[in-house]
Amino acid sequence: MLYSTGDKVEVSSDEDGFRGARFAARVVRSTPKLGRFAVEYETLMSDSDPTKKHRETVDGTHLRPRPPSPPPPAAGSASRFGVGQRVDALQNEAWWDGVVREVLDGGGRYRVVFPESKEETEFAAAELRVHMEWVNGEWVVSGRKNMLETELNIGSMVEVSSDDEGFHGAWFTATIIGATDKDFFVEYQSLRTDDETKLLTETVDLLHIRPTPPDAPVVEKFNLLEEVDAFHNDGWWVGVVSKVLDGQRYMVYFRPWKEEIEFGHNDLRLHHDWIGGRWVRASQVMEM
């Protein structure tokens, strides 16, 4: 997406400790042909001069417009947010992606768990907003995470993510072999135990599991800057096509590693996001 000088935006980061956070800023210089934008943060101050707001140049993949203001709560509603609902929580000068774990004080306060850190923190209602994703130029509201809505049953084929260092952005295929009220017991399709004698099994929570993506139509060619999943080291890793090579081969750039790897056509698939209980096709990352 193209941004102009003066546009109000939110900025994300791939740095450890800041994944899942978005900082309010405005664009102060635009170089769309390079996909780079200089921004000035609203609340972050400069390290060299604490009287001035912090400025830096960021890649366009880390920008999105500001989300719209939420509608007022319905008349007579005791709680603005429900258990299991995905929200953004205002903490340390940024909005952090989390999930409501508990409603407190009749809806005046909420306990929120953060998938990245697995920490839980209590917030006032005014410090939360409904989580929204910017997809294909439109805002999509995330719904509640509900086992019935996602049809995660014993025997279902699913994909599982991990917050462990070095695995951010990867999804591994597994089968649900057991479940409790809060967790799922899964057996991975290709990950094996350390001694390689059997398939790895693990307990995961609802924050780290999703159905398998829908069968995508056959793609004759992936486009430059298209967001894709690449099959690598037994998992699907989200990346961006950085070069289109001859012979149906592609260079894919992975933002968390800041690294390019070459893949064949059959090792890529169209990237989809699981948002609000439905699959949403990802758009191209930026426009030239």
Image: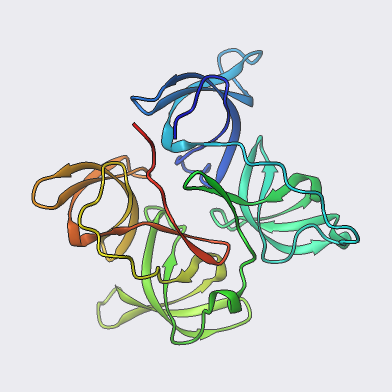
Q: In this view, does 78 lie to the left or right of 169?
A: right
Quarter that holds the N terminus: top left
Q: Where is residue 94 in the image (x, y as percent from the top left)?
A: 63, 38
Task: From the top left corner, tell me how far across and down residue 40 is, in percent.
Answer: 56, 21
Residue 36 in percent (x, y) is at 40, 26
Answer above or below: position of 67 versus 153. Answer: above
Using the rendered view, name the quadrant where residue 233 is placed.
Answer: bottom left
From the top left corner, tell me how far across and down residue 179 is, in percent: 54, 83
Q: Nearer the viewer, residue 228 or 56?
A: 228
Look at 71% across and 42% down and name the residue there: 69
Q: How many marks?
A: 0
**Viewport quadrant of the C terminus:** top left
Q: Which residue appears at 19% of the width and 62% of the height?
A: 266
Report which quarter residue 34 is drawn in. top left
28 is higher (above) or lower (below) than 149: above
- Whether 173 is drawn above or below 271: the answer is below
Q: Is residue 192 visible?
A: no
